[in-house]
Every structure is written in structure tokens, then in C-alpha cells.
């Protein structure tokens, strides 16, 4: 796979197959590894600078110190023609939309905790004792 990325990046007609930005962003995960790729995301390529989003300032500072090692790994993956520098920007991870889980809307209308008691006799006793205590 490393050779394929390098070959495609070096081809004259590579722009017709895929953009340099997609090649550079695709090489990010292989260059930094799975664990680091879960905390970061290569976003775009501006001229010859790869822009990478990180979670916070600590990650940005840590990766800034490792940028030369990361650049060497990227060069091994796709060559030296595409990415010459890295920029790290702080952008908190985005959460995907989630489905509502929990009680159906009809259960939300009933706020009385006594409705959860299945036995009608016990439910009546519970309500009467609660009414006496709160009166």
C-alpha cells in the first residue's frame, strides 16, 4: 500500500485519478498510527502544508514537537512532492447525531412515579401514604 500511494503521487496524471489533498489526508493515518489518528484528523492541504485538527492545546504542542518525525513518515508513504510542512489547529472532536434512547414519549407525559407500580392496590396505598406525608 505504501508503494501504491507513492506511485500514484508521482504520476503525472494523478490529478485525474485523485487529488493531492486526498493522497495527503489518506497518508496521515499510516504516518502517525491508529492510536494517534483517533485523536487527530487531517483536514485539508493548503499549498504544501497539511492542516491537522487536534482535540486541545496539549495535543497541538505535543504533535508540534514531533512534526519532523511525522513529516519523515509521510515522505516515506507518499514522497516529498506533496507535503512539506504541518499545521495543527485545535478543533474539538465532532459528535455524530444520535438516536434517542429511553422511554417512549407517552411515558414522558406521566411524571408520577406511582405509575411504575404494576399492582393497582399497592399503587393506591403508595399514593395515599405519599399524600399524607406531603400534606
Image (cartoon, helix red, strand yellow):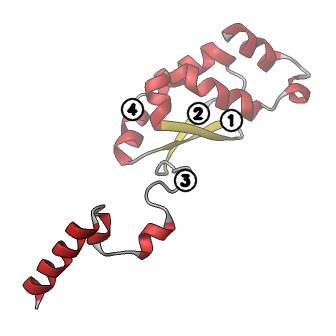
Tag 2 secondary structure: strand
**Are discs 4 and 2 less than 8 Å apart at CB?**
no
Q: Which label is found at residue 48? A: 1
Between the C-alphas of marks 4 and 1, the distance is 19 Å
User: What residue occupies the far front of the structure in this picture?
Assistant: 121
Spot occupied by residue 56 in the image (x, y as percentages of width and height): 39, 48
Q: Which residue is rendered at x = 63% and y = 37% of the image?
A: 49
Mark 2 nearby-residue class (10 Å; few <14, some 14–19, many ≥20): some
Q: Quadrant of residue 113?
A: bottom left
Disc 2 or 3, which lies upstream in sequence?
Answer: 2
The N terminus: image quadrant: top right
Task: Say which of marks 3 and 1 sits in front.
Answer: 3
- The residue to which callout 4 is attached is 65
Q: Residue at x 59, y 27 (%)?
A: 28
- Nearest to N terminus: mark 4 or mark 1: 1
Decide which of tag 3 and tag 4 comes sooner along the chain: 4
Q: Is residue 17 positioned above or below 111 on the image?
A: above
| Picture disc at residue 85 | 2
C-alpha separation, residue under disc 2 versus residue under disc 1? 7 Å
Q: Earlier in the sequence, mark 2 or mark 1?
A: 1
Q: Are marks 2 and 1 in contact (CB under 8 Å)?
A: yes
For mark 3, give the secondary structure.
Answer: loop
Whether residue 121 sits left or right of residue 43 in the image: it is: left
Please name the residue shown 62% across and 18% down the image. 75
Amino acid at each position: 500500500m505504501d508503494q501504491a500511494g507513492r506511485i500514484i503521487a508521482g504520476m503525472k496524471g494523478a490529478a485525474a485519478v485523485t487529488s493531492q489533498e486526498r493522497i495527503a489526508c489518506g497518508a496521515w493515518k499510516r504516518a502517525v498510527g491508529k492510536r494517534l489518528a483517533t485523536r487527530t484528523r487531517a483536514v485539508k492541504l493548503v499549498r504544501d502544508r497539511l492542516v491537522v485538527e487536534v482535540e486541545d492545546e496539549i495535543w497541538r504542542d505535543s504533535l508540534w514537537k514531533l512534526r519532523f518525525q511525522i513529516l519523515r513518515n509521510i515522505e516515506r508513504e507518499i514522497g516529498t512532492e506533496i507535503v512539506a510542512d504541518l499545521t495543527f489547529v485545535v478543533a474539538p472532536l465532532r459528535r455524530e447525531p444520535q438516536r434517542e434512547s429511553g422511554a417512549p414519549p407517552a411515558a414522558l407525559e406521566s411524571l408520577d412515579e406511582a405509575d411504575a407500580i404494576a399492582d393497582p392496590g399497592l399503587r393506591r396505598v403508595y399514593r395515599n401514604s405519599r399524600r399524607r406525608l406531603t400534606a
